[in-house]
């Protein structure tokens, strides 16, 4: 499938510096910043700098350098936030919503890192 990327989405504007953000970590290929409407004491969004709509788009089309950088950045942030289970932290949840069924609001790949409180079951029972 060929994804079409909307360069006017809010995270593209953040990447271009048109909208401010509360940066947690920036690397060559990745930006991580605090969610504007946090749903847990720790709520960080991690986005690739490249124009990828959602996770499968990135996983299938990004370069190995981008994928390694992105994945390592997520690990680094878990460490920075002190939420690694087994390392003194109490754990976390990663979420990446995609498309209509995933209720994705911003069409630029982002992984939510949530932690700092018990997060309940993964999904509400339908
Ligand atoms: P989605 O529903 O697409 O997985 O999540 C989008 C997330 O982006 C939401 O948690 C929302 O609070 C966050 N968000 C939307 N606009 C902005 C913004 O301008 N700045 C920041 N930091 N987060 C935003």
Image (cartoon, rainbow, N blue to C red):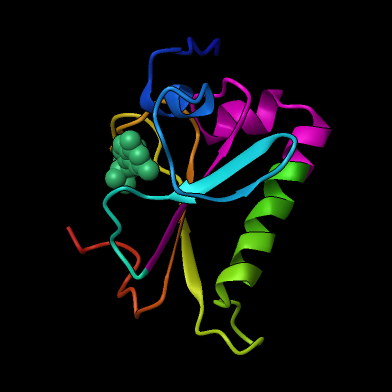
The number of discs equals 0
**Magenta includes 8?**
no
Q: Quadrant of the N terminus?
A: top right
Q: Quadrant of ligand 1?
A: top left
The answer to whether residue 104 is seen in the rendering is no
Q: Which residues are magenta?
A: 42-68
Residue 121 placement (x, y as % from top left): 31, 72
Where 106 sits versus 34, above or below?
above
Where 119 sits versus 67, above or below?
below
29 on left or right of 36: right
Q: Nearer the viewer, residue 10 or 67?
A: 10
Residue 93 placement (x, y as % from top left): 46, 65
The answer to whether residue 94 is seen in the rendering is yes
Residue 51 placement (x, y as % from top left): 57, 20
Residue at screen point 75% across, 43% down: 69
Residue at screen point 68% across, 52% down: 73
Quarter of the view holding residue 29: top right
44 on left or right of 2: left
Q: Nearer the viewer, residue 95 or 125?
A: 95
Q: Which residue is most to the right?
A: 65
Residue 45 placement (x, y as % from top left): 47, 48
Residue at screen point 71% across, 26% down: 62
Q: Which residue is most to the left?
A: 126
Q: Quadrant of the C terminus?
A: bottom left
**Magenta includes 64?**
yes
Q: Nearer the viewer, residue 47 or 103?
A: 47
Quarter of the view holding residue 118: bottom left
28 on left or right of 34: right
């Amino acid at each position: 499938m060929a994804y079409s990327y909307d360069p006017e989405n809010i995270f593209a504007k953040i990447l271009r510096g048109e909208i401010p953000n509360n940066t947690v970590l920036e690397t060559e290929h990745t930006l991580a910043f605090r969610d504007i409407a946090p749903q847990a004491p720790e709520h960080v969004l991690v986005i690739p700098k490249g124009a990828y709509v959602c996770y499968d788009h990135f996983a299938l089309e990004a370069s190995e350098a981008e994928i390694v950088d992105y994945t390592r950045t997520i690990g680094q942030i878990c460490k920075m936030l002190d939420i690694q289970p087994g390392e003194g932290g109490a754990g976390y949840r990663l979420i990446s919503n995609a498309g209509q069924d995933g209720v994705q609001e911003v069409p630029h790949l982002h992984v939510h890192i949530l932690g700092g409180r018990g997060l309940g079951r993964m999904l509400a029972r339908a």
